[in-house]
């Protein structure tokens, strides 16, 4: 891209609160989601035309709580095709916030390009007082248009902060600062200028083993959430549902109640991979720490939260079946 021309950015609209509509300006919880077309959302932010040439595509119009493997694979395919086009300098995806962190991580692990890809949503619909969508989207465009964003993996921008797709998690039901990373944001966007202070250390995009391959289908991986008095029946039911792996969102550092150990070992004996994760939301679950993973042939999640570990494991299972190789994936990505 020559410095004299504005970058060409493609914005893919998928729905969510950023495309919502409330009956009144005080509706910040009860409003219609996924109704405003992406073209209209952009028209209402004229400052964007000053920083980029914009094309839009309405690829979906639905709440991200409905996203599954089909939507992830479709988005990856479309974005990959756009990134191959020499005329496209970057891509922005507007997305519901509920599973935005999962989609962002999936793309972070599977896109084969150094061009900026930014995922953005909003916690309030555009009709609400102090709506956050317009500035979030403007900041996403700034990032996608900036050469500084290249080769940093998929970025999520929210509430002025730039997050790595690997680390970011939606961590509030309503606050504007709903997106957080356990190690902090990579940087900020302020008044149309991105400032980066950190880089993701783990493998992504062009250095990820999945970025070069076609992926047509993802295996089923389920999550079982631990609690006091949790029933082993939850594991048995999940195992019967036909999953290839179960992520057990265990208590604390990956502790497994005595009752549950047998059920998880039984599932493993039936060929289902078992991953010990934690429901705490941050920190490491160490292999052979709270449980003898080597003896049970289980996996330990390292530091990923259960719902993002699920994305990583679905991809890992497209390549590997051996416990050792799957464990290496958790340590590398
Ligand atoms: N329904 C939610 C979603 O699409 C709303 C949101 O965008 O926050 O994820």
Image: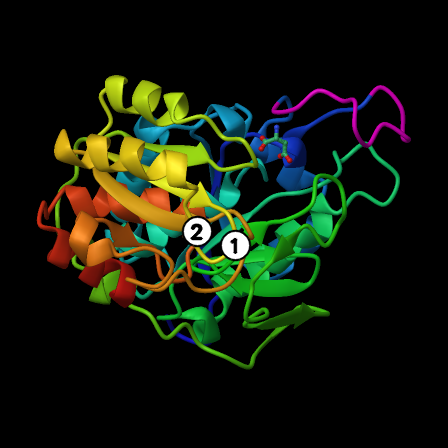
Residue drawn at 42 percent across, 59 percent down: 166
- Label 2 crowd bin: few (<14), some (14–19), many (20+), radius 10 Å: some
Q: Is residue 50 left or right of residue 262?
A: right
Which one is nearer the viewer's eye here, 37 or 210?
210
Q: Is residue 103 left or right of residue 24?
A: left
Quick one: quadrant of the C terminus?
Answer: bottom left
**Residue furthest toward the bottom?**
197
Distance CA(mark 2)–CA(mark 1):
6 Å
Residue drawn at 69 percent across, 63 percent down: 160
Which one is nearer the viewer's eye here, 65 or 190?
65
The answer to whether residue 100 is above or below residue 162 is above
Magenta residues: mostly which secondary structure? loop
Q: Quadrant of ligand 1?
A: top right
Using the rendered image of the protein, determine whether residue 37 is visible from the camera's viewpoint.
Answer: yes
- Label 1 crowd bin: few (<14), some (14–19), many (20+), radius 10 Å: some
Where is residue 275? Give x, y as percent: 30, 46
Please give the range of residues in magenta. Answer: 23-34
Q: Is residue 247 magenta?
A: no
Residue drawn at 31 percent across, 27 percent down: 70
User: Pointers 2 and 1 in contact (CB under 8 A)?
Assistant: yes
Q: Is residue 267 left or right of residue 246?
A: left
Query: Does mark 2 have its CB less than 8 Å from ligand 1?
Result: no
Q: Is residue 137 left or right of residue 2?
A: right
| Residue on which the image places disc 2 | 255
| Residue on which the image places disc 1 | 252
Residue drawn at 12 percent across, 57 percent down: 325
């Amino acid at each position: 891209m020559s410095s004299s021309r504005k970058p060409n950015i493609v914005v893919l609209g998928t729905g969510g609160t950023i495309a919502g509509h409330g009956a009144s300006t005080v509706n910040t919880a009860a409003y219609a989601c996924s109704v405003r077309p992406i073209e209209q959302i952009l028209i209402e932010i004229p400052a964007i035309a000053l920083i980029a040439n914009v094309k839009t595509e309405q690829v979906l119009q639905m709440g991200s709580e409905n996203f599954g493997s089909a939507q992830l694979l479709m988005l990856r395919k479309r974005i990959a095709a756009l990134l191959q086009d020499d005329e496209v300098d970057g891509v922005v995806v507007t997305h519901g916030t509920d599973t935005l962190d999962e989609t962002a991580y999936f793309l972070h692990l599977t896109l084969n390009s150094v061009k900026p890809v930014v995922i953005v949503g909003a916690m309030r619909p555009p009709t609400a007082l102090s709506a956050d969508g317009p500035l979030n989207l403007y900041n996403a465009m700034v990032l996608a248009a900036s050469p500084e964003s290249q080769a940093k993996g998929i970025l999520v921008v929210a509430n002025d902060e730039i997050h790595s797709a690997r680390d970011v998690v939606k961590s509030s039901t309503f606050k504007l600062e709903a997106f957080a990373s356990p190690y902090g944001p990579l940087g900020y966007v302020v008044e149309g200028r991105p400032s980066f202070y950190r880089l993701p250390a783990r493998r992504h995009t062009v250095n990820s083993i999945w970025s070069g391959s076609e992926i047509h289908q993802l295996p089923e991986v389920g999550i079982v959430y631990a609690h006091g008095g949790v029933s082993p029946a939850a594991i048995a039911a999940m195992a019967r549902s036909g999953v290839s792996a179960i992520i057990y969102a265990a208590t604390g550092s990956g502790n497994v109640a005595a009752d549950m150990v047998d059920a998880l070992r039984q599932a493993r004996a039936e060929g289902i991979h078992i991953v010990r994760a934690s429901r705490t939301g941050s920190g490491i679950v160490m292999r052979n720490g709270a449980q003898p993973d080597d003896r049970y042939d289980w996996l330990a999640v390292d530091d990923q939260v259960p719902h993002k570990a699920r994305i990583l494991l679905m991809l890992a299972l497209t390549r590997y079946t051996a416990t050792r190789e799957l464990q290496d994936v958790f340590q590398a990505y």
